[in-house]
Amino acid sequence: MKILFLMLQMSTNESVSDMYTDLVEEFRDHGHEVTIMVTDSKIRHTRIGIERGMRTLRIKAMPFVGVKNLIKKGIGMALFPYQYKMAYKHYLNEEQFDWIFMPTPPITLVDFVFYVKYKTNARFYLILRDIHPQSSASLGEIKYQFMIDYLELRAIRGYVIADLIGCMSQSNIDFIANLYPWLDKSKLVLLLNWQKHVDYSESQLDIREKYHLKDKFVAIFGGNIGLGQRIENIYSLAKHYQANPNIVFLIVGKGVKKDELMFMIEKEKLQNVLFIDFLPRAEYLDFLKSMDLGLISINENNAVPTCPSKAVSYMALKIPILAMINSNSDYGIMIENAGAGYWSVGSNKEKVYALFDEIYDNKDLRKEMGNKGYEFYLKYLNSNHAYSKMMDQISKC
């Protein structure tokens, strides 16, 4: 099968991976011919070559990761379909593809997908990881109605031209089905988040020693620190447990709200929070191996059911989970049904503290949650399972 996979970013360092590189490598390893198109703001000119054993077309584009100015970010994303089309015409115009894979965000690339789909008679699998503009609008990230309308039209077009729409959970499927009752429901299929299998090993004591965390109970929050993560949830936990010298909160990552969170911590003179900048996933996973608890925080104002991919890493490395999430998501239920941890609506602080205490006080419970989460990961959340699930769905399409 010849696949065109559209990405927003992919490291030139082949030892650095993420959810999407895990997936394309699965298709590569199963004998499919994969072509990747990816934006890159660091290169001087668009270029094509072989990366990770796959043909990769890197497209010169405006930076967008970590861009705080939403107008600049919006302009950059609006330009993507034209930049992709120009690069495609120059390098891939004579190619034929069986399937086009595209994750969201951004949804703005659907115009380019439309062009390739009907030029090559390919089919289109939309990997729906973020539902926009509903999510961003509910959080106040998009304040201009014309931008909301523009993204809504792009989203609708994407849903219309997609042959399959892979949703993160049943709540995601129901949300799209209810939002667009005219949409062909047979397109909506379940595709859980995934991660390449990682061999589990015992805690890395040297990491704890390096950061003076030996004999501490360490709760980690890793990944993007943005409006969607509601930093107040992390701050309130740190403040509540500031008198306990055995508890440390480790924040690993970056994002538009990181400076604000650091200011809040500094203002309260909290000594139980340690910030570490963004790490490549291999190094981040080394950190996770020695953690006691994995934290998840979702802004409860988010109108869209969400499933943060960081939970997959927690489960893959046997880390119990405490999730502070929005009430309209089935994500917490999935975690509890898997036996991997607990969840609460983030605004219910007393319940959050009670659940944290229960996990903190019971080492056997933490071990049991870690083992059950790992079993769930092996069965449902590894990249080979995602590949098999997609191939099964494609064969029935």
Image (cartoon, rainbow, N blue to C red):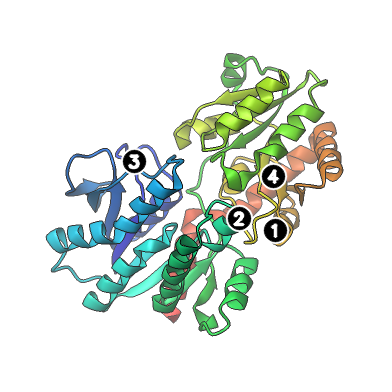
**Relative image position of residue 386 (x, y in whole percent):** 49, 61
Single out the mark in the foreground, 2 or 4.
2
Q: Secondary structure at mark 1?
A: helix
Residue at image point 54% right, 81% down: 185
Disc on res. 307: 2
Q: Secondary structure at mark 4?
A: helix
Kind of residue at disc 3 = Ser
Dot 2 or dot 4, earlier in sequence: 2
Disc on res. 11: 3
What is the C-alpha distance between the residues marked 2 and 3? Answer: 24 Å
**Relative image position of residue 190 (x, y in whole percent):** 56, 69
Asked whether the beta carbons under mark 2 and mark 3 sit within 8 Å of each other, the answer is no
Asked whether the beta carbons under mark 1 and mark 3 sit within 8 Å of each other, the answer is no
Kind of residue at disc 1 = Met
Label 2 packing within 10 angstroms: few (<14), some (14-19), many (20+): many
Splitting the image into 4 quarters, where does residue 329 fall?
bottom right
Single out the mark in the foreground, 1 or 3.
3
| Total labels drawn | 4
What is the C-alpha distance between the residues marked 2 and 4? Answer: 21 Å
Quadrant of the image for the C terminus? bottom left
